[in-house]
Image (cartoon, rainbow, N blue to C red):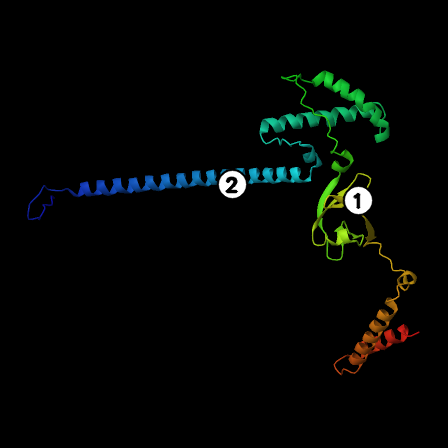
Amino acid sequence: MVFKSTHPSGGHDVSPGAHVVVVVVVVEAVVVVVLLVEELVEVLVVVVVVVVVEVVVVVQSWKQHEQDVETTPPIDLNIDSLCANSPQAKGRVERANGTLQDRLVKELRLRGLSTPAAAEPFLPVFMADYNRRFATPARVAYDAHRPLLPTEDLTEIFTFQELRRITAQLTVNYKRGLYVLEDSVENRRLRRTTALVSEAADGTVTIRGNGRVLAYRLHPRDHAQLVPGVVVEHKHLDGVFAWIAAQQHDRDAARLANPKVTLRAKKRLRAAASSADP
């Protein structure tokens, strides 16, 4: 059977099979497009994941670099840190560390050296042997080391340094210790400013503000002790303590008169008041 066109302008006869072929071709094209879109989405997801990972690695490396620069004292000596960001550079570093961690430990074990004091004299011998085996001559023989300037104090530079804020009461908090600065006209000008706290390898703490060393008294919070004999020596504290005791007595009396306070709480208040009375 053949269908004829009823269009006024006339036309060619169209077989039903032609319509089926067109529909099949369109469906196949749609399927191909869908598959291509799915593959493109998968590729984009992989690319996005890789980019995000790279960005995270770069940000972490940059933060670590900033932390190293901020917390490393050699920055005062105009020494920059070069991070091993590439796999090749990281491999060289790890190979050297692996050699030192393995070879040095075995050399110490063979010689029976088990303490830092006993191993220290052997280190120059090990360094000379290690450099003889693995050292690579520099491409440029120029020595770029510079002499130490008179203003560069290595005992001050090679310390753990942190910034701390000086409170209005001339105190500095550092490692659970309360450092009370000397009350002077110069130190009062440093209130609410930033001080540099330096801790040496032996634990000595130095506080600097405005370019000078600040005298202080240390009050450890973990070992705080109250010596009443020393406190009462102050001529104004006796009256203050009497006023505090009177205020506490009035508060206890008000709580005892309050009907909402339980009998157990009133009993504790009376026991505390009786034990506090001489």
Which of the two marks, 1 or 2, is nearer to us in this view? Answer: 1
The CA distance from mark 1 to mark 2 is 43 Å
Query: Residue 172 got which mark?
Result: none
Q: Which element carries disc 1, helix, strand or loop?
A: strand
Q: Position of residue 188 (x, y in %)?
A: 75, 54
The residue shown at (70%, 28%) is 97
Q: Amino acid at mark 2?
A: Val
Question: Relative to 269, is 125 above or below?
Answer: above
The answer to which of 153 and 85 lies nearer the viewer is 153
The image's mark for residue 205 is 1
Residue in the picture at 85% in, 77% down: 270
> Measured from the top left, where is residue 179 in percent x and y?
79, 51
In the drawing, does residue 5 fall left or right of residue 257? left
The residue that disc 2 covers is: 52
For this view, does 141 lie left or right of residue 207? left
Tell me: residue 227, above or below residue 208. below
Q: Are marks 1 and 2 in contact (CB under 8 Å)?
A: no
Instruction: Determine the secondary structure under disc 2.
Output: helix
Task: Give the amino acid at mark 1.
Answer: Val
Q: Is residue 136 above or below residue 182?
A: above
Q: Earlier in the sequence, mark 1 or mark 2?
A: 2
Instruction: Tell me where residue 213 sits by quadrant.
Output: top right
Q: Quadrant of the C terminus?
A: bottom right
Residue sitting at x 88%, y 62%: 231
Using the rendered view, name the quadrant where residue 143 is placed.
top right
- In the image, is 260 to the left or to the right of 68? right
